Image: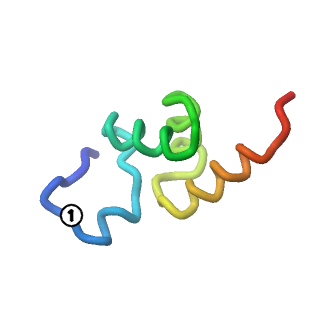
Amino acid sequence: MTDDKTKTGAADRRQVAGGETYEVDDFAHKHGLTRAAARALIKQHGNDRATLDRAAEQQRRQPAH
């Protein structure tokens, strides 16, 4: 499902539109992730922005293997 660009209020910002490259890129940039890593988080955790922010923080804090 694509992002409805006519809905620009707070409700729209609660979700990351995984199908919209610019939103995935923005999320990835915010958290220092690659686009692929950001897409993987969206696939794993869904599109709720708060949940994704927490997951990205946890991933960033984990030591590299």
Q: How is the image coloured?
A: rainbow
Q: Looking at the image, which residue sits at the far left?
A: 6
The image shows residue 9 at horizontal and vertical percentages of: 24, 70
Q: Residue at x 31, y 39 (%)?
A: 20
Report how many numbered discs are placed on residues in the image: 1
In front here: 26 or 17?
A: 26
Within-10-Å neighbours for mark 1: few <14, some 14–19, many 20+:
few
Query: Where is the C terminus found, in terms of image quarters?
Result: top right
Q: In this image, 51 relative to 19: left or right?
A: right
Residue pointed to by mark 1: 8
The quarter of the picture where residue 7 lies is bottom left
Residue 34 vs 32, above or below: the answer is above
Q: In this image, 57 relative to 21: left or right?
A: right
In front here: 45 or 25?
A: 25
The image shows residue 42 at horizontal and vertical percentages of: 52, 45
Q: In this image, 17 relative to 54: left or right?
A: left
Which secondary structure, mark 1?
loop
The image shows residue 44 at horizontal and vertical percentages of: 60, 44
Residue 34 vs 27, above or below: the answer is above
Q: In this image, 48 relative to 40: left or right?
A: left
The quarter of the picture where residue 6 lies is bottom left
Residue 33 vs 53, above or below: the answer is above
The image shows residue 59 at horizontal and vertical percentages of: 72, 44
Q: Residue at x 57, y 61 (%)?
A: 51
Q: Looking at the image, which residue sits at the far bottom?
A: 10
Q: Residue at x 57, y 35 (%)?
A: 33
The quarter of the picture where residue 10 lies is bottom left
Amino acid type shown at disc 1: Thr
